[in-house]
Every structure is written in structure tokens, then in C-alpha cells.
Image: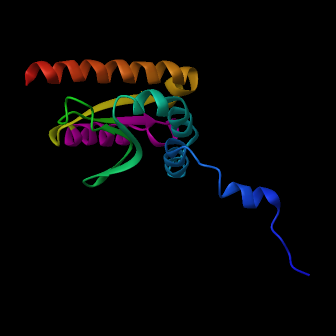
């Protein structure tokens, strides 16, 4: 007796998947915390409209939560978005590390935006809107400086 695959497996290969959804699904696997997942889920579409939005990006010796690059009209503008969950950012030592990390990223030419876990948990959509507003402001500033 010949086994035939279920019809849905046969049909699945002919369904054209949205390339944007494929990218989203592939990148969501990199996320490490609930606040990152929430920010990604709410920010993917609006922030991707501003440039290339990516999670867990390596910059020099650091791995940052999110980056926004390839912003149309201002290729030199590069943005890092960091989400500071309480467990990893509550001590004075961790705060000092974050501060020196911010300076190193800024020296390397990155604009840094930080949100606390409480801000993300309280109003993730508001944090995404604020990020988009800040990026638009950076974009205008960079355009004027050229």
C-alpha cells in the first residue's frame, strides 16, 4: 500500500508565503525575553517602514536588542534600541556597564534609545510610537546637517 501525504502537506508547497512574513518568522527566533518579543511584535511593521529593523544585532563587542539601519535619505543614521529588563539592569554595576556601553555605541556612530521593562510592559505601543518619533527626529536632524 502506497502512503500518500495528507492533502494539506501537498497544498502547502503551492501556497505563496509573504516574504515579509517569512523574514518576521525567521528573525523572531532570535528574541530572548518577553519584552523583546512584545516590542518586536508591535514594532515590526511600523519600524520596518522607516528602515531595516532587526533584532539581536552584533556591533563590535556588543550584541544589542534591536537596530534600525538603511533609513532612506540618511544612510549614515544608525539607531540602537535597547530594552532594559529588571533582572539584568537593576544593580549599580549593571547601570554603569549600560552607560559605558551607550558611550561606546555613540562613539561608533549609533543613536541609542533605551526603554525599561516597566515601560514596555506598561505601554509597548507607546514605546514603539516614541521610537518612531525619535527616529523621524534623528532623520530630520541628519538631513539638515548634510
Vertical side of 21 occupied by 112: above or below: above
> 132 or 24, which lies in front?
24
- Residue projecting furthest to the left: 146
Which residue appears at 23% of the width and 41% of the height?
Answer: 105
Q: Main secondary structure of the magenta part?
A: helix
Q: Write down the region rendered in magenta.
A: 81-105
Quadrant of the rendered structure where residue 106 is?
A: top left
- Residue projecting furthest to the bottom: 1
Which residue appears at 29% of the width and 20% of the height?
Answer: 136
Q: Tell me where residue 49 appears, x and y as whole percent.
A: 39, 29
* Residue 19 colored in magenta in the image: no
In this rendering, the count of numbered labels is 0
- Residue projecting furthest to the right: 1
**Which image quarter holds the C terminus?**
top left
Asked whether, in this view, residue 37 is left or right of residue 115, the answer is right
Quadrant of the rendered structure where residue 50 is?
A: top left
Q: Tell me where residue 63 appears, x and y as whole percent.
A: 35, 50
Vertical side of 119 occupied by 95: above or below: below
Which residue appears at 49% of the width and 49% of the height?
Answer: 27
**Which image quarter holds the N terminus?**
bottom right
Asked whether, in this view, residue 99 is left or right of residue 120, the answer is left
Which scheme is used to colour this image of the protein? rainbow
Asked whether, in this view, residue 18 is left or right of residue 113, the answer is right
Asked whether, in this view, residue 108 is left or right of residue 21, the answer is left
Which residue appears at 27% of the width and 33% of the height?
Answer: 71
Q: Tell me where residue 7 appears, x and y as whole percent.
A: 81, 59
Q: Tell me where residue 82 appears, x and y as whole percent.
A: 39, 36
* Residue 85 colored in magenta in the image: yes
> 124 or 4, which lies in front?
4
Amino acid at each position: 500500500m502506497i502512503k500518500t501525504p495528507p492533502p494539506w502537506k501537498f497544498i502547502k508547497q503551492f501556497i505563496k508565503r509573504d516574504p515579509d512574513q517569512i523574514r518576521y518568522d525567521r528573525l523572531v527566533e532570535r528574541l530572548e525575553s518577553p519584552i523583546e518579543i512584545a516590542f518586536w511584535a508591535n514594532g515590526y511593521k511600523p519600524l520596518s517602514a522607516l528602515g531595516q529593523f532587526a533584532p539581536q544585532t552584533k556591533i563590535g563587542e556588543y550584541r544589542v536588542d534591536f537596530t534600525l539601519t538603511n533609513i532612506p535619505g540618511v544612510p549614515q543614521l544608525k539607531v540602537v534600541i535597547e530594552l532594559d529588563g529588571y533582572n539584568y539592569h537593576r544593580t549599580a554595576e549593571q547601570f554603569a556597564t549600560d552607560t559605558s556601553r551607550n558611550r561606546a555605541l555613540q562613539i561608533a556612530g549609533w543613536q541609542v534609545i533605551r526603554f525599561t521593562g516597566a515601560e514596555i510592559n506598561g505601554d509597548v505601543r507607546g514605546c514603539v510610537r516614541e521610537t518612531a518619533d525619535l527616529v523621524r527626529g534623528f532623520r530630520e536632524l541628519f538631513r539638515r546637517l548634510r
